Image (tube, rainbow, N blue to C red):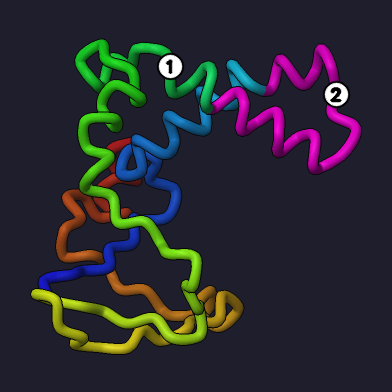
Amino acid sequence: MGITLIHTQPYDPQSKGKIERFFRTVQTRFYPLLELDPPKSFEELNERFGRWLEEEYHRKPHASLAGKTPHEVFQPQVERVAWIEDHYDERDVYVYEDGKQVAEAIRVRLEDNAYVKRHRSPFATVSMKERDQDV
């Protein structure tokens, strides 16, 4: 199917740049709001984070999007999103190719998956050893 699962090297934030940048944005722009007015419950925290994402993060221009907002980039593509229907049943998840069922997804236990031995990705550009020597 042409799908490759690629794990980044441990302690290599450059290879996870987008998510690392998002975490930094949350730390510098959302966390201070919590310090000023701490949430009183997890529900309140989740509600406030969702509101911040929608009203702030998704509505501000991003340099990586050529000055557009994530909302502006997403909206023209919304028709391409395949939404999960109301009768979705997570017990049976299938993979389709060209409109035909080709495989059944297998549930992975996070506990077991955490101990799987990872091999160096063939897509990695710098090995951990090489990187550590440069420091």
**Residue 36 belongs to the span the image colors magenta:** yes
Q: Residue at x 53, y 74 (%)?
A: 114
Q: Residue at x 44, y 86 (%)?
A: 92
Instruction: Report which residue position mark 1 lands on.
Output: 59
SS state under label 2: loop
Q: Where residue 21 sits in the image (x, y, percent)?
A: 42, 29
Q: Where residue 81 sits in the image (x, y, percent)?
A: 28, 50
The quarter of the displayed image where residue 73 is located? top left
Foreground residue among 88 and 1: 88
Could you tell which of marks 1 and 2 lies nearer the N-terminus? 2
Measure the alpha-carbon separation of dots 1 and 2.
24 Å
Q: Where residue 79 sits in the image (x, y, percent)?
A: 23, 43
The quarter of the displayed image where residue 96 is located? bottom left
SS state under label 1: helix
Residue type, numbered disc 1: Arg
Query: Does 29 appear above or below 132?
Result: above
Query: Does 31 appear above or below 94?
Result: above
Foreground residue among 16 and 68: 68
Q: Quadrant of the N terminus?
A: bottom left
Query: Does 44 appear above or below 71?
Result: below
Q: Residue furthest front?
A: 86
Foreground residue among 71 and 6: 71
Q: Residue at x 76, y 34 (%)?
A: 45
- Say few, some or many: other residues with alpha carbon within 10 Å of mark 1 (under 14 / 14 to 19 / 20 or more): some
Secondary structure predominantly adopted by residues drawn in magenta: helix
Residue type, numbered disc 2: Pro
Q: Which residues are magenta?
A: 31-53
Q: Residue furthest right?
A: 40
